[in-house]
């Protein structure tokens, strides 16, 4: 096999991780645009982050490129990417602080548990729905159209994500307990 083919194969093998890491780096402009109150840019970054999240999972499954690194870094990146705007929404009194504290607590515990399990403790289906609901809530909160009508819908999706946060936290603790 030529060096060119090896390099292409190596790059192809890293596509999911490259997409995940690119999403991680999107958090820096996300923070800046939140801080300078540019919701349209935040909206665009959240959409871009969602696209990279979808495709890193798609390529990992499609090309059978599931790794422990990916199983740990992808959900961690999702947490960072979603928690930053959620914290900002808390700062602006759109969602209560106590709920973000519970979400953050769950995410830190699950991230720690993932590092102790051989396969990285991949996300459950409910965990994926939790992330999806938070993502939808953020898209609606930061969408550039009329905010009044859609605010209630955004809050609904936030609370659905919050409920799944509690359910999946209990599920992950059961899994960890059974693996000890």
Image (cartoon, rainbow, N blue to C red):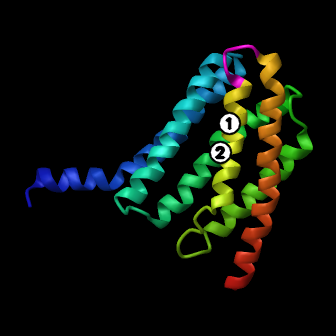
Crowd band around label 2 with a 10 angstrom C-alpha radius: few (<14), some (14–19), many (20+): some
Assign the N terminus to one quadrant of the image: bottom left
Pointer 2: what residue?
A: 132
Q: Residue at x 71, y 84 (%)?
A: 178
Tell me the quarter of the picture where residue 85 sits.
Answer: top right
Contact between labelled residues 2 and 1, with CB atoms less than 8 Å apart: yes
Q: How crowded is mark 1: few (under 14 residues within 10 Å), some or many (20 or more)?
A: many
Residue identified by numbered label 1: 136
- Indicate whether residue 4 is drawn in magenta: no
Residue at 83% over, 43% down: 159
Residue at 64% across, 21% down: 33
Where is residue 88, by image quadrant?
top right
Task: Point out which mark residue 78 bears.
Answer: none
Residue 4, image x, y percentages: 12, 50
Q: Position of residue 123 (x, y in %)?
A: 61, 61
The magenta region covers: 142-146
Q: Majority secondary structure of the magenta segment?
A: loop
> Is residue 144 one of those drawn in magenta?
yes
- Judging from the image, what secondary structure is the residue with disc 2 in? helix
User: Looking at the figure, which quarter contains the C terminus?
Assistant: bottom right
Q: Is residue 14 left or right of residue 68?
A: left
The answer to whether residue 71 is above or below residue 174 is: above
């Amino acid at each position: 096999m030529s060096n060119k083919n090896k390099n292409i194969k190596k790059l192809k093998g890293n596509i999911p991780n490259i997409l995940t890491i690119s999403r991680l780096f999107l958090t820096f402009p996300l923070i800046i645009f939140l801080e300078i109150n540019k919701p349209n840019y935040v909206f665009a970054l959240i959409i871009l982050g969602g696209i990279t999240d979808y495709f890193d999972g798609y390529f990992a499954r499609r090309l059978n490129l599931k790794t422990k690194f990916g199983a740990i870094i992808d959900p961690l990146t999702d947490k960072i990417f979603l928690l930053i705007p959620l914290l900002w929404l808390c700062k602006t009194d759109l969602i209560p602080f106590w709920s973000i504290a519970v979400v953050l607590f769950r995410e830190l515990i699950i991230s720690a548990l993932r590092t102790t399990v051989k396969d990285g403790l991949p996300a459950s289906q409910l965990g994926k729905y939790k992330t999806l609901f938070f993502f939808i809530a953020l898209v609606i909160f930061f969408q550039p159209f009329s905010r009044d009508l859609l605010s209630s819908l955004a809050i609904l999706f936030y609370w659905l994500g919050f409920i799944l946060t509690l359910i999946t936290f209990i599920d992950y603790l059961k899994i960890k307990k059974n693996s000890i």
